[in-house]
Amino acid sequence: MNQRPCALYCAIIAVLLLPACLKPGPIIVPPGHPTARIIQLKELDPLYSDSSRVAYNQLGNPVSITPSSVSTGYPMWLFRYDNQHRLIASVGAYDNGLNMFEMAHRYVLNAAGRIISDTTFVFGTFDTTVTPLRITGQGVRTTSYNYDSYSRITQTVTTDLVPDIPRFRTTVNYSYNNTGNAWKIVTIRVEIPYPHAIPDTSITYPVYDNKPNFHRLHPVWQFVDRDYNTNNPGNAISYDTYGLATEMQPNTNILGIFYHRGAIRYEYRP
């Protein structure tokens, strides 16, 4: 390994993993690493082959994820911010010049700048050039968010809005351990018309690798995938020289997009 990659590797490890020596207490590392960012997502399954380009603004905030072929089920995702550079909307748009979307999220923030609620819309139009931004479509669900003192999501409560029966309210609780990973995730699902019925409850205990979690490269990626962990859930199939995952396990969501065999490409800057 030549001198420059070695120095870059040491810088990434120092920022992402150094707090592991701090005990007691969880490993908490601010996201937004200055020398690495995701620039491409790729589907490796030949039956669904596609490649998406990830673009950023001058501040380094993601503004779009654009597939090579925009179509139904494969929209381009646009991320919009307020004048304080806080995420206020994500829109799965069609590239037709008519500002039409397949799915869109409008976020409400609290005084601390955290997203506390999210309304999800399907099949409508949007205009993010006006204030307040305009999203017109069928609202299908709302989600509220709670956080811990480290700005990690600890609970989501999602409620169906469509007046069909059955309708559900789903609560997900995340419990973090001293390594900064969610060691237990409890999902509780109850049918809204029958709130006293026995809920459907499931508990998962994720297993993690020992590599830096690529979601920590930007807080938007953490929020989109609800992944605030220090390490990656499960073992990736491959990693690059700097320990970041380059191919994930099959049938995985990456930055909110489902991949049968998903690969990630990064850009490293001085």
Image (spheres, rainbow, N blue to C red):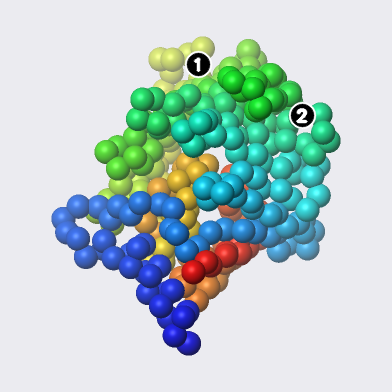
Q: Position of residue 42 (x, y in %)?
A: 68, 60
The residue under label 1 is which amino acid type? Ile
Q: Position of residue 171 (x, y in %)?
A: 43, 29
Residue, x 71% and y 63% (percent of image)?
Answer: 44
Mark 1 burial class by Cα count in 10 Å: few <14, some 14-19, many 20+: some
The answer to whether residue 46 is above or below residue 119 is below
The answer to whether residue 128 is above or below residue 36 is above
The residue under label 2 is which amino acid type? Met
Seen from this angle, which residue lies furthest bottom? Answer: 2
The answer to whether residue 187 is above or below residue 44 is above
Residues tagged 2 and 1 counted as in contact (Cβ below 8 A):
no
| In the displayed structure image, the side of residue 190 where residue 249 appears, left or right | right
Seen from this angle, which residue lies furthest left? Answer: 24
In the figure, residue 203 lies in which quadrant? top left
- Could you say which is closer to the camera, residue 7 or residue 123? 7
Q: Position of residue 159 (x, y in %)?
A: 51, 22
Residue, x 59% and y 20% (percent of image)?
Answer: 131
Label 2, on which residue?
Answer: 100
- Could you say which is closer to the camera, residue 96 or residue 191? 96
Q: Is residue 232 visible?
A: no
Residue, x 68% and y 36% (percent of image)?
Answer: 92
Q: Is residue 195 visible?
A: yes
Assign a secondary structure to mark 1.
loop
The answer to whether residue 142 is above or below residue 265 is above
Label 1, on which residue?
Answer: 192
Q: Position of residue 212 (x, y in %)?
A: 41, 63
Of badges 2 and 1, the one in the foreground is 2
Assign a secondary structure to mark 2.
strand
Comes first in the chain, label 2 or label 1 = 2
Residue, x 49% and y 69% (percent of image)?
Answer: 270
- Could you say which is closer to the camera, residue 15 or residue 58? 58
